[in-house]
Image: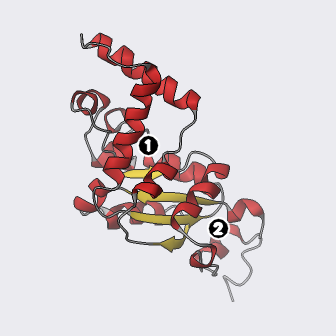
Amino acid sequence: MSKLKEEKTLVLIKPDGVQRSLIGEIVRRIERTGLKLVALKFVVATKEQGYELYKKDETWLVEKGERRIVQREGAGEPIEKSAREYGTDIVNANVSFITAGPVVPMVWQGNRAVGIVKKLVGGTEPLTSDVGTIRGDLTVDSYDISNADERCVRNLIHCTDDPREAEREITIWFKPEEILNYRHIAEQMLYDVNLDGILE
């Protein structure tokens, strides 16, 4: 099988998705694309897992912090920290939320798995996510209200941004032996060049 067909991505249903009983709906939406589920757990994340998941570099921290400063200025709120400190606050809020209750980490495999899942999940902010996406259809949170409440945006699901990052994030939640290698019957319809055997 070609490497493209074996691309893997991490999907994590966050505590709000679990508490709102959306596990089945989220799995169903991803499953319908033709991607293959190769690993799944139901766990309470540790702080170590949370900080590893949201491991951000200096550039990310400063960029997000600068955006937070602009939002605070627009709302007439005082600027009390550096951009980096505001960026660090965002990471801390994400970790606090991801460890607040059970989560469902999953690994999905298939052609362009990372891109397919990102398209299906939608943008980070539910308010501006497209209709038809998981975040756009199933929740109503926004940056404005999450910033006002000084918490992270509750957007049901985490998904990986690129294949290299997927490799790193998968190891936070799964050992290699926990990722199953099996043949799914749908793979023939999706990937078999000649569809040999359909009319037998």
Q: Residue at x 58, y 72 (%)?
A: 175
Scheme by which the image is coloured = secondary structure
Q: Secondary structure at mark 1?
A: loop
Q: Residue at x 37, y 44 (%)?
A: 94
Which amino acid lies under the numbered mark 2 shown in the image of this protein? Leu
The residue wearing badge 1 is 122
| Nearer to me, 36 or 68 | 68
Q: Is residue 18 above or below residue 63?
A: below
Residue 75: where, in percent of width, then height?
Answer: 25, 14
As drawn, the label of residue 142 is none
| Nearer to me, 41 or 195 | 41
N-terminal label among 2 and 1 = 1
**Tag 1: Cα neighbours inside 10 Å, few (<14), some, or many (≥20)?**
many
Q: Quadrant of the N terminus?
A: bottom right
Of the residues tagged 2 and 1, which is closer to the observer?
A: 1
The residue wearing badge 2 is 190
Which amino acid lies under the numbered mark 1 shown in the image of this protein? Gly
Please give left or right for residue 8 compared with residue 132 in the image.
right
Residue 128: where, in percent of width, then height?
Answer: 36, 32
Toward the bottom, the furthest residue is 200
Q: Secondary structure at mark 2?
A: helix
Instruction: For marks 2 and 1, give the CA distance.
Output: 24 Å
Q: Is residue 131 visible?
A: no
**Tag 2: Cα neighbours inside 10 Å, few (<14), some, or many (≥20)?**
some
Please give left or right for residue 175 compared with residue 152 in the image.
right
Please give left or right for residue 141 compared with residue 70 in the image.
left
Residue 31: where, in percent of width, then height?
Answer: 47, 66
